[in-house]
Amino acid sequence: MRTIGVVGGMGPAAAADFYARVVAAHCVLRDQDHPPCIMYSATQVPDRTAFLLENGADPTPELVASVNLVEAAGADFIAIPCNSAHAFLASMRAAVSIPILDMIALVSAEVARVVPQARCVGVLAASGSVKVGLYDKPLKKHGLVPLYPDFEVQDEIMAAIKDVKAGGASEISDQRLIAAAKHLCDKGADSLIMGCTEVPLALAAEDSPVVAIDGNQTLVDTTLRLSLRQFDFEEILYAIR
Amino acid sequence: MRTIGVVGGMGPAAAADFYARVVAAHCVLRDQDHPPCIMYSATQVPDRTAFLLENGADPTPELVASVNLVEAAGADFIAIPCNSAHAFLASMRAAVSIPILDMIALVSAEVARVVPQARCVGVLAASGSVKVGLYDKPLKKHGLVPLYPDFEVQDEIMAAIKDVKAGGASEISDQRLIAAAKHLCDKGADSLIMGCTEVPLALAAEDSPVVAIDGNQTLVDTTLRLSLRQFDFEEILYAIR
């Protein structure tokens, strides 16, 4: 088995959820049949959204230090359960010699696979990811067009994400995200991406009017299958380069 | 904040649960207000119970390598959410220069604190921990006497623990542990220790006829408070030496 590396903590609840899902997705009898995992919950990484939107501190140095730490500790590849952090993927990849999974590319491919008739994909993401158009190119590769919420709805999504970070999902954050999902569908989305790791902690996929891809689960599934050698890096070059 | 080190994976679901609880126990607004954490889910460590009971492989070398890894990665102290692994605590401590929390000492102190009238403590633990009397001395320090189940009930507890490791708690594992808790109380236990990290994943404390200390939560609380510098190592010398 390959040793899983995780750079998480963005937020920490999403990292905990990520590893719990990796374990739950693998039904085996003994501890020893699970892949080893080195998870660094790097909570000190400056806020990605604050940097992308405003004049926040640059998270790049801490992100680079974090992937370095996980590589040095012995991971064979790295998963990062934080969509916004992928805005800094190139810098992180330049710093290590092991593959770092591109969650954004994986999730975009998953939409095309699960919803083959999709054209217009609603994106529920943090405002920084939206501003830099994180999903634009990866979706375009699959002939898909991203659809973003109106400003005031984007603010509601960001408020829900902050709610989840500040102590977990609540009825309020759930309702905010359900309303945002409906808004995107009203605007013409035929599918949705839950493109922030906090979103699936509050929004249940079944509460979306259209198929909503849980990006966390996509990353979990790929991570687990890679670690179990169910496929090789060469088979997902689009997500490791 | 102190960087938390976790050597887990024994089992992996307990490690995931441990970190999820550390995050949930700390209600703050921002990712950056959570302590950083380096968790090594060292699933490859040979089965502790198989070594303590039978002729299984010695887990000591892998345990030592695991604490070394977490120390080298930058942890300020180490928590190990696995009771049985504490049978090898001395070897692990000898290998590192940072403190390793003694979960067994912490849980024993917690029984005395929470149930001051306790005398006879029922121990729900893996059969290896029972065989080596892992809780005997730490409980005795508090004037407490451990009470163990009859052999056939111990086998039922071990079966429940294996169930949890093999895919999570079920109605069967729950019932086995509830019956074991009742059995210990019938034998005279005035309090219980859930002394295997898999036990609180199946047995709800409220299903015990007497106060049942969730050892996972005790370790979570101490870990979080240490990382937040709410107390210092000197104040819990009994649990770090």
Image (cartoon, coloured by chain):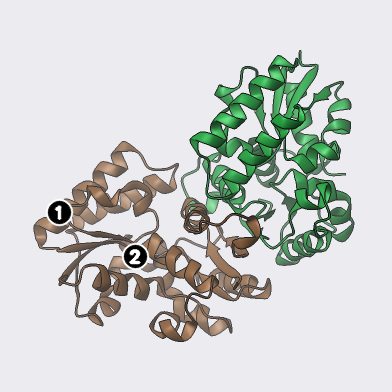
Chain colours: A green, B brown
Q: Residue at x 48, y 52 (%)?
A: B17
Coordinates of residue A12 in the picture (x, y in percent) = 60, 53
Mark 2 Cα shell of 10 Å, populated few (<14), some (14-19), many (≥20): many
Name the element at disc 1.
helix
Toward the top, the furthest residue is A117
Report the chain holding disc 2: B
Mark 1 Cα shell of 10 Å, populated few (<14), some (14-19), many (≥20): some
The amino acid at mark 2 is: Gly
The amino acid at mark 1 is: His
Asked whether residue B88 appears in the rendered view, the answer is yes
Q: Residue at x 49, y 34 (%)?
A: A171
Coordinates of residue A90 in the picture (x, y in percent) = 88, 50
Q: Residue at x 74, y 43 (%)?
A: A83
Distance between the alpha carbons at the discs numbered 2 and 1: 20 Å
**Residue identified by numbered label 2:** B128
Q: Is residue B46 left or right of residue B175?
A: right
**Residue identified by numbered label 1:** B183
User: Nearest the camera: A31 or B214?
Assistant: B214
User: Nearest the camera: A4 or B118?
Assistant: B118
